[in-house]
Amino acid sequence: MKRLVPVLCAALLAAGAAHAGQMKPGLWEMTMKSDAMKNLPKIPPEQMEQMRKMGIAVPQMSDQGMVTRVCISKAMAERDQTPEMAKPQHGCETKNLTRSGNSYAVDIVCNSPQLKGQGTAKGSFSGNESFSSTYEFKGTANGQPVSERHESKGRWLGADCGNLPPVDAMMKK
């Protein structure tokens, strides 16, 4: 679990920084790869299906990484700023957001008892229907040294999110 915290921060950041005014609203498929994911226990397909039937949003895991679907609301897609990360939960915040053309870069600073360190996220868009990003973080998670590299990519699937709530609604909880 201690190595998963930076991955979770990266996932939030990828969803947050990426939609700073460049993404189409609607359903997106996000693929995330990280060295930390190699250490996660494998959940049998039957157990994954049972969890899904119980209403638990379980991402697909494969050699290509973790694949999940997220809903980007119209308000999120139109935002011209990077939303706050889960600061109250992880003590992380974003700083120094820069953009040049279809690319962005942002620094991440975490300072809580559970997570301390610094990282950088960089990404670029191919139009408003796909993006790719990288995230690097060095510090400590629950007192243990952490050095993470994370890659993500996203592609727009369509305007209708179905029953999936927008990411910004989930981040408020």
Image (cartoon, rainbow, N blue to C red):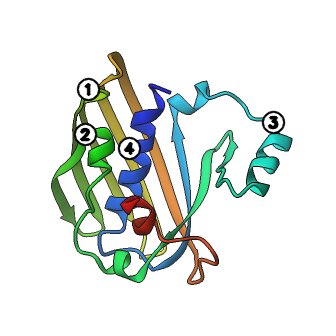
Amino acid under disc 3: Pro
Asked if labels 2 and 1 touch by Cβ distance under 8 angstroms, the answer is yes
**Label 1 neighbourhood size at 10 Å, few (<14), some (14-19), many (20+)?**
few
Chain-order first, disc 3 or disc 4: 4
Amino acid under disc 2: Gly
Does 150 sit above or below residue 36?
Answer: below
Question: Residues under labels 3 and 4: Cα distance?
Answer: 26 Å
Mark 3 secondary-structure assignment? loop
Chain-order first, disc 4 or disc 2: 4
Q: What residue is pinned by disc 2?
A: 91
Question: Residues under labels 1 and 4: Cα distance?
Answer: 15 Å
Q: Nearer the viewer, residue 48 or 19?
A: 48
Mark 2 secondary-structure assignment? loop
Question: Residues under labels 2 and 3: Cα distance?
Answer: 33 Å
Chain-order first, disc 1 or disc 2: 2
Asked whether, in this view, residue 9 is left or right of residue 61, the answer is left
Question: Residues under labels 4 and 2: Cα distance?
Answer: 10 Å
Does 85 sit above or below residue 156?
Answer: above
Amino acid under disc 1: Pro
Quadrant in the picture for residue 126: bottom left
**Label 3 neighbourhood size at 10 Å, few (<14), some (14-19), many (20+)?**
few
Q: What residue is pinned by disc 4?
A: 9
Question: Residues under labels 3 and 1: Cα distance?
Answer: 34 Å
